Image: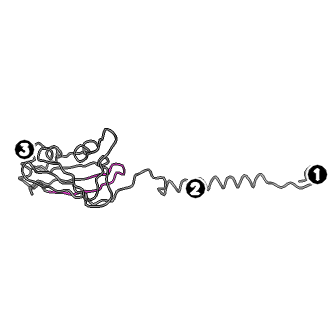
Amino acid sequence: MLGAGGKAESAVSPVVGVMLLLVIVIILAALVAAFAGGAVDGKEHVPSVDLAVYTAGKGDDFRLIFEHRGGDPLGVGSLKVNTWVHLPGGDLCPASHGGRELEGLFGTADYEAGETTIWKAGEIRNTTNLTTTAGFLNLDKKELSDNITRSTVVDVAIYHLPSGALLHKSSLSLKER
């Protein structure tokens, strides 16, 4: 087709339209790939730790020991500890502790002020005595003493709440040492 001055016009509009369409498709494909590949994952880093849980002490000094044997430091307020005491007759006595409750037991920071205690490799936390241990396991003091005599099994699981990861799972016998 000839224009007003007798010059030929080329079809530039369809080429520009196709190029814009290709750019939009490529950008959308990159966004979908980023979400599908986990590049925009909202979960927090899972800490790598070696934890141990065991009993210590006798009589009124009986306690649970939580030992951080190595790995990343942990914020005590970001942990949840679940226990299940295997009672005679096959029943379970569950207990769960996290956040403020664990800070009160394991920590020294001011939880109300938004602080959290950092639990580092080589550090040990414990339930301090028979009464506190009984409360931690959701038992009364006499029930705990009876279960110690029987060497009752307790399952323990420690979770990192921000990542949802299970950091430690073990079974132990309630024995005086």
Local packing at callout 1 (Cα closer than 10 Å; few below 14, some 14-19, many 20+) is: few
Tag 1, which secondary structure?
A: loop
Instruction: Determine whether 116 is above or below 29 in the image.
Output: above
Give the residue at mark 3: 142
Q: Mark number for residue 89?
A: none
The residues colored magenta run 158-172
Q: Nearer the viewer, mark 3 or mark 2?
A: 3
Indicate yes or no whether the magenta region holds residue 126. Answer: no
Q: Secondary structure at mark 2?
A: helix
Q: Magenta stretch: dominant SS?
A: strand
Residue where numbered disc 1 is placed? 5
Which residue is the site of mark 2? 29
* Quadrant of the rendered image containing residue 170: bottom left
* Residue appearing at x 45%, y 52% in the figure: 41
**Circle 3 SS class:** helix
Tell me, yes or no, whether the highlighted magenta stretch contains residue 169: yes
